[in-house]
Image (cartoon, helix red, strand yellow):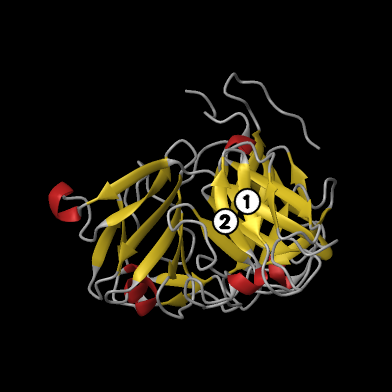
Amino acid sequence: MAFTSINDGKLYFNTKLHTGDGGGSGSSTGIGFQPNMVWSKSRTEALNHTMFDSVRGAGSNKELTPNGTSAEGGANSAGFGYISAFNSDGYSWTAGSTNTENFNKSSQTYANWNWKAGTSFTNDASSTGIGTIDSTGSANDTAGFSICSYTGTGSNGTVKHGLNSAPKMIIVKSLGASESWFVYHADLTSATYTINLDTTGAQFSNASTWNSTAPSSSVFSIGTDAGTNGSSVNFIAYCFAEKQGYSKFGSYTGNGNADGTFAYTGFKPAWLMVRRTDGANSWIIMDNKRTTFNPMGEELKAEDTSTGNVATRWDQLSNGFKLRNAGAAVNASGGTYIYMCFAENPFTSSTGTPVTAR
């Protein structure tokens, strides 16, 4: 069996940086595929994160803000700019009506993180017997990523996620109500626990979020919580299954030392998001485009509008990452952490050839 089926992670995930020119519209190209989810953040101005996906569609009322609780379209993308189309090698944007732009303010720099899903699905649960709640979406089983939309019932239920293996991480957002983002991660204490993307709070026990049930190879479970299953409310779920050599959704324990913990992923990381779970702290996001040498430096925070901050948190290695910072956000002594990580390339290719370190 091959170590990986993905030799080039950039075919499914890619970070794209750009500098605004102040124009009324523009495009981001060179991504290498048609993205199905785009997460963007200004590196130089304290603006909202924005997230768009192809299942909900592009447009001025389609933004979601990972750092806030706003419903879909509730963060004034008409004023701050939005993605107007998903293209074969990137996407187009339209500038907003204010001088502060999410995508194209003159001389401002932006980080844009892009994921590929791709195969559309529609599930009538009563006809297929898969799940109890209807869903539609876009799935890429090779890369282990799907986007699915569903309408809540207010009662315990299950939703088809479109993948052929159980997701290790699921991020759900209410589209029709001001609610937090809820995150399932396989390495939280149990499926009774959840953690919010838009806050710094620790993991917490809430049986009504995921109905205390881990996802299966076909469905994920939701309880009665309004944040994942409000009655007659529309939701979007981003589901990630682990793929050897390409993605890892794991955990580690910090050692409180600048000669920090090593986390084995089986590949050279291209993008990493880390979150402490046993105490309050930030979601730390790093990638291989904003800093191209070790120690990796510039970080952004998923729950915060702050600009890029150089903190030299980690070394990118050929088979994982090593913490180079004793800070509590990533490496407190005895602290517990979860992470999601995507590959630049695998440690060993599908032909058995090892890659080199940076």
Q: Amino acid at mark 1?
A: Ser
Above/below status of 317 relative to 212: above
Label 1: element kind: strand
Residue assigned mark 1: 92
Q: Which mark, residue 84?
A: 2
Q: Earlier in the sequence, mark 2 or mark 1?
A: 2
Above/below status of 58 relative to 69: above
Q: Nearer the viewer, residue 141 or 296?
A: 141
Residue furthest toward the left? Answer: 127
Label 2: element kind: strand
Q: Amino acid at mark 2?
A: Ser
CB-based contact (under 8 Å), mark 2 and mark 1: yes
The answer to whether any part of residue 160 appears in the image is no
Whole-number angstrom distance, CA of label 2 to CA of label 1: 6 Å
Q: Residue at x 68, y 42 (%)?
A: 29
Q: Quadrant of residue 222?
A: bottom left
Residue 265, position as x, y percentages in the image: 61, 44
Residue 5, position as x, y percentages in the image: 52, 28
Q: Nearer the viewer, residue 181 or 293?
A: 181
Q: Quadrant of residue 4?
A: top right
